Every structure is written in C-alpha cells, then in structure tokens.
Amino acid sequence: MTRGRPAAWEDAAARERRLHLLQLAVLLLATIGAAVALSILGRGIVSADNRRQVGADHLAALVAVRDRMRAADTAFWEDRARGGAGAPAGVRALARLAPDLLRGLKARDPDLTGAEARAADRAIAAAEALVPLAGIPTTPPGSIRDLEALRSAQPHRRELLRSVDRWATLQQALVDRAARDGHDMASRLSLVLIVILTGLASAASVAWFLIDRLRRRVVLSVARQAEERGAIIGAMQDGLVAVGPDGRILEVNERFCELTGLTRDTLVGSRAPRPYWPERDADTLASLEGRHLAGEAGDSDIELRRADGALVPVTYSAAPLVDHRGRPGGYVATVKDATERRTAQHEQRRRAAEQAALGRVATAAASLRGSSLDGLFALVAEEVARLFGVEGGRVARFDGADVAIVGSWSDGRGAAAGPSRGPSPLDAGAAIAAVHRSGRPARADGGSPRAAHSSIAAPIRTGTGVWGAVSAVTAGPAAFPPGAEEHLARFAELVGLSVSNAEGRARLAAQATTDPLTGLANHREFHERLAEEVARARRHGRDLSLILLDIDNFKATNDAHGHQVGDAVIAEVGRRLAGGTRPGELAARIGGEEFAVILPEIAGLHAWTAADRVRRTVCSRPFPAIGALTLSAGVCDLDRADSAEELFRLADGALYWAKANGRDTAFLYSPEVVRELSAAERAERLERVQALAGLRGLARAVDAKDPSTKRHSERVADIAVAVARELGWDDERCLLLREAGLLHDVGKIGVPDAVLFKPARLTDDELAAVRQHAALGADMVTDILGAEQVAWVRHHHERVDGGGYPAGLAGDAIPLGARILAVAESWDVMTSVRAYAPARTREEARAELASCAGGQFDPQVVAAMDRLLDRGDLSAAERAGAGEAAAPA
C-alpha cells in the first residue's frame, strides 16, 4: 500500500485504470475500423463519382457528336429537299466529321464496356465506310450517280447514326449506374457510421456503468473507512492535522481545534502563514513546514498560538504522504499538548537549579571561616535572584521591630538596594515587611508610585523562630508567576538550616577563638596568631613585637569587691584594650587578668612606646565600682627571640620584672635588666594552677550530677565570702575562703550516687559513707591549698554544740572559716530543690538558721547572715555564685 493512502483507494485506482485502458482500446479499435470502412467506402464513392463524371463527359461529347451528325444529316436532307447538292456532299460531311470524332471519343474512354465498344466500333466502321464515298464528285441531285452514291451511303449513314445512338444510350446507362453506385456507397457509409457510433456509445455506456459502479463501491468503502477513521480520530487524545501537497490544510480533528481555539471551518483550506503560528516563530515554522512538505518526517517541540493569544507548548510529529509514484503528497501531523511535560521539565529544572543553589549555599556555609556571615548572606541573595531570573535579591535579619538588610545582590539594573539597616520593615521592601508582620511567605506586585518594584519574600526560620527573610526583587508589576513565593519558602527552609549551621559554626568558631568575657582573642587564638606572625616576619624579614599586660593588684580588687565586679573590670579592660589597638594588631586575653597585644612590623622601641600608649588608654578613666587601676606591661621584639615560644617567654619575663619593680610601668626586655623566672619557679606556678583547675573540675562534676546541685559550690563560696566580709575579713583571707568554698564538697566524688541522691532516709552505713566526704576532700586538697584552707574544708560539717563530724569539734575549736562555710552551705541547701526535700522560702530558711544558732551554727555567723539579708546583699552574692569565677591571680 502506498504510504498515507487507504487500501480501498489503491484497489479502486487500479481497477479504474484498467477500465480506462479498456475504454481507450475500444475507442481505438472503433476508430481504426471506422477509418478503414470510411476509406473503402470513400474510395468507392469517389471512384463511382469519377466514373459518373467521366461517363457524363463522354456522354456529353458523344451527344454533341451525335447531334452534329444528326444536324449534318438533317441539313443534307433539307438541302436535298430544296434541290441542293447531291449525295456526295452529304457523304463528305459525314465522312469528314464522323471517323475522327468517333475515334477520339473511343480513345478518351478506356473503360468502355463491351456493348459500348461494339457500338463504337460499328459507328467507326460505318463512318470509315463513308470515307471512300467522299471522293465521288458532286453530281447533280437526282442524277443516277447521285442516287447511286446515295444508295451506297445510306446503309452506312443509318448504321452510323444507329450505332452512335446505341453508344450514347449505353453511355447514358453507364452514367446512371455510376450515379446509383455512388448513392449506394453513401448510404452504406452512413449505415457504417451509425453502427460504429452506436457501438462506441454502447461500449462507453457499459464502461461508464462499470466505472460508476466501481466508484460507488469505493465511495461506500471509503465512507466506511472515513467513518471508522473519524471514530478513531475523534477518540484520539492528540490533535491531528492533514496538509495537502499545495500547503492547504485538508482536515483537522476536534482535539486540534481545542488546542488552537479555532474552528474547523477556519482551519480547513487555510494556507501558510497558519492562524495558529506565533508571529515571532512564523519564519521558523514556515521553514519547518517546507521540510515536511518536501517529505521530511520528524518531531519538533514548538508553541501554538491560541485564538485568545495564549501560547500552548506542543510536540509536533509529522509523517509524509506520498502518491503511487512515490512523490510527496503533503503530510499528516499529530499534535500532543506538552504543557504538563513542559511544566514538569520546568519544575525539574527549577528544582535542579534550586538544589544547585542550595548546594552552593551549603558549601559556602560549611567552608565558612571566622564569625562574619556577610559573605554567606550575599551569596544567598545572589542565588535567590539568579534562581528566579530577576534583578536582585536580599536577606533580611529581624530584631524585634527592626529589620536589617544583612545581604543583598543586584545585577546593576537597580532592582535591589545595597546592604542597609533601618528602623522600619518598610525600608526593606513590602514583601519583607509582610513577612515580618505575619511570619508567612508574601508577595508585593509593583507598578504603582508607592511600589515601583515587585518582590516576593519567605521567612528564614532557625531553632529560635523566624530569624529573618529572603527576598527576590525585580522591576515592573506582577513579574513573578503564581506560587513563586511558595517555591521561595522551600528555598528559605534550607537556607534557614544553612544559616543555623553557619551561625552554629560561627558561634563555635567564635567560642573556640574568642574570650567570652572580653570578646578578645582567647589563649588558643593568640598563640596560633603569634606563631603565624613570627613565621611571616621571618619569611619577609620584617619586625614583630609582643606586649604582655597584667592588671596590678587584681587579686585584692577581686577579693574586696567580689568576682562579679572583678569580671566586670576584666570585661571593661578588654573593651578599652580593643579600642586602643590599631588595625593589624591583635589584642587577646591569655589568662585571668593577663592580656597580650601582637604588633606586626613594629620594632622594640616603638613597641615599648605602644605599650605605654595602650596602658594609658586602658587606665585613663576610672572603672565603675573600684575607681582607678593600673597595668604592668612587658615588651619584647623578634630580634631577641628565635621562636614564638621564646618571644612569649621573654616578654613574660619583662612583665614580671615590671611587676617586681613597682608595677604601673612597661619594660622592654633586655638580658642585662630582666631576670627570667627559673624553670623551677615556672613549673611550680604552673603545677599549682593545673592542680587547682583539676580539683575545680571534680567539684563541678559532683555538682553536675543532679540539676538541683548545679553550681552549688560557686554559690556556697560567694555566700561565704559575703559573710566573711561582713565579719571584717580582708580581701586576701576572703580569697582564701573562696578557694576553700569552691572545693569544700570535692570529697563527695567518693560517695556513690545512689546514696548521695537517695530521696528516702539514709541508713547508718549510708550516713557513715556520706560523712567521710569532708575528710576525703581535705586530704585531696592538702597539696594544693594552705593548711588553714584544708582545715576549713575538713571541718565545715562540725557543729558548735560538738555533734558534728568528722572530729566532733565544738565552739571556738572549730575554725571560723569552717563555721562560715557551714552556714553558707546550709542556706544554699535549704533554698534549693533537693531529691529528698522541696526548697524552702527565704523566710523559712532564715527562721531555721535562727533556731539552730548556738547549737548547729555559730551565732555571730548567723547574725552576719541576718544583716546581709536585711540589706539585700546576700542576693547579689547568690547571683554571683551562679556564674563562673575568674581565675585567681
């Protein structure tokens, strides 16, 4: 079967071609037969007519001769009747006339019949017989000679006239017969023509009947197939369009009409450019159709323009139609609506782009260095703008009623402002303002004087709630498709995770490199930077100096005013020190009250001057609660040291030299002036600090076993120091009491948790195990604390009436420090929730202390507590105990 044409059309075409050939054969045979018959009959008619014409000519000549002869004969007899010339004259006239004329007539008619020839021969013979008589002289009429001549010539004359008449009669019969033959042949020719035409008409009628019958059958078959195809085409979910070889649309189905929004009447018969071609793609689609009309098949992703102007993406699959000779005869195309596929592909590409953008954000967050997130926010803003294909993006941070633009990106067309901060959400854009109000995704379409740009925004959520918002901004009204803010919300969720992780990493990094109290670099960051700066200075041959600073007499300040005030002083020193350093310099807190400043590209003498400048900057103004304080400083440059460790050691030596020689000064390291600490001194100092820190760790571990005892030791230490100050203790002894208070319960590390936190009444064995912790703790701190401090730890559970443990001391035999710790610990126990008892109110605890004064507690210590409670000073001491104490000097 020829491609693109039904089988019925092929069979009908073959049969029709055979019938047409039969028609042509019949017509050809009839034409040949008619031509032959017409030729034969025509030749007969022409021949008969020729014979008739020749016979008529001969007859006319013969009649003329006969008439002349008769005229001559008549003239002879008339002349004889008038007595004219005699017989010779008449004979001579006939003799002269007849022979030659008769022989000429016979010669002119070669087709004479036998009768005619015989009549001619007799006439000629009679004429020739008269010839001799023509020589007879003329005799008078009536003479014997005349009569004899007349008698001799008379038979010949009569024979001549009779033969001529006979010849003329025969010639007339011949002419008449030739005329009849011509008429008969014309009649036969007419009959033959009638027969031929009748046969041709009959054959044509039969052939026409057969062809018409065949065509009706084909039409019915094609109609059935068309009906079947129509049912199939009608059931097709795809559009169908058939185009003829001349470019006209032959047929479309209903689905194609639905896709284009055009009617069948509008489409069928139309030529290029098609009414459903978008103007911008008309040239491309015309070229595509030209290839299809030339026989090229293929699939194409194009867009059709609906009657309402909307563009519909479709897949256009064309297959050529060819005739029985294999020549292109148009094409048929199926048109599949690709909106869902295009939407799915677009969504897939959007999600891929979104994932790629999030991947880049996550990678940037994972590789973040330092505490600043500005680079991450700028990247988020750029990725959001590129994701939506708009001019700009923003990241906003919410802080109560304020909104800060912490990151922005713009392609230069002015759709997004640069980083800025403002007191009002409106300064950040309408969409961000809506997110700030509602905490939900929002959009703001522009196009008005109050909203020149369009924007969408979605909340960035972290573990603490709505952290801020991310926004995409573009010029023009309604530039974002429906649902764009929801897509942005999904992006914002992952951005929130990245921000949370980045902030967490930044916090950890800041905690790892920053001192939490002062905000300066911590001990670890300081030593890492010092090593880097030393290596850089060595590599480039540049100067480097180090300043170490220490707050003078800070121990006394701490003891006199408490650790809360001490921490505030250290924090203020850190702020002033940071404000007094210059760009490129690094200020750090490296110990309790010790600070350091790294000075790149500064030589020793200039560093010494800088140390004095830093000291003056820090100490120029009095400090809240304590007034003025001073700093000591030690300075060393890299010319004196071979490594970072040696540079630090030499600067530390200069610092101790300054403190040992009057404080409130700065010394530049010199081998002739500065005496370094001996290795034994430094080892002893370090060992004590490390041991004390280890025991503090154990004490914290004991307190941390139960939430109700968390920071118990810190609170007891601070309350004890407050009571001691109320009793008149100096700062140095208060510091010693604080150290003992921090470690008073370290012996509980040897008491099982099941006993330590048992909610029910303890058994005798369990009570004995608990009572061992005081002596155990004293033994643990013997090598770290002084003898008096060890006694405070050992006896802080003794009673004034002698009923305590571990030694059963009574009255003044119990060290005063131990008695103070006993009251401080009892107060904290009573006012805290414990596993075996609920917390008491302050009034109840105060009443309990008063009732136990003189029995369990020292009355003077209880009285000091009352005075503190009356003034409200004990609350400050309790709050101070909730924080971490500064390291001792």
Image (cartoon, rainbow, N blue to C red):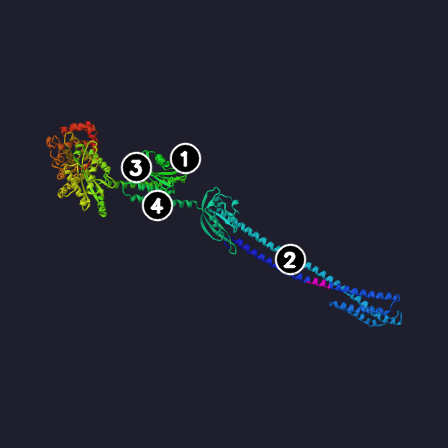
Question: Depth check: 669 or 653 in front?
Answer: 669
Q: Secondary structure at mark 1?
A: loop
Give the left or right position of residue 787, taking residue 99 as reference.
left
What predominant SS class does the magenta segment belong to? helix
| Residue that numbered label 2 is attached to | 199
Task: Quadrant for residue 54, please give it.
Answer: bottom right
Q: Residues within 10 Å of mark 2 (few under 14, many from 20)?
A: some
Q: Residues within 10 Å of mark 1 (few under 14, many from 20)?
A: few
Which amino acid type is shown beneath numbered disc 3? Answer: Thr
Q: Residue at x 64, y 61 (%)?
A: 33
Write down the region rendered in magenta: 43-52
Task: Quadrant for residue 653, please give it.
Answer: top left
- Return the disc, 2 or 3, that comes first in the chain's sequence: 2
- Say which quadrant the C terminus sits in: top left
- Return the disc, 2 or 1, that comes first in the chain's sequence: 2
Tag 2 near tag 3, CB within 8 Å? no
| Residue that numbered label 1 is attached to | 449
User: Is the residue 290 above or below the residue 120 in the image?
Assistant: above
Give the left or right position of residue 458, taking residue 627 as reference.
right
Q: Secondary structure at mark 4?
A: helix
| Residue that numbered label 4 is attached to | 356
What is the distance, in whole Å, between disc 4 and disc 1 at their CAs? 36 Å
- Return the disc, 4 or 1, that comes first in the chain's sequence: 4
Which amino acid type is shown beneath numbered disc 2? Answer: Gly
**Looking at the image, is mark 2 or mark 4 nearer the viewer?**
4
Q: For residue 46: magenta? A: yes
Which amino acid type is shown beneath numbered disc 4? Answer: Ala
Which amino acid type is shown beneath numbered disc 1? Answer: Pro
Q: For residue 713: magenta? A: no
Tag 2 near tag 4, CB within 8 Å? no
Question: Depth check: 584 or 807 in front?
Answer: 584
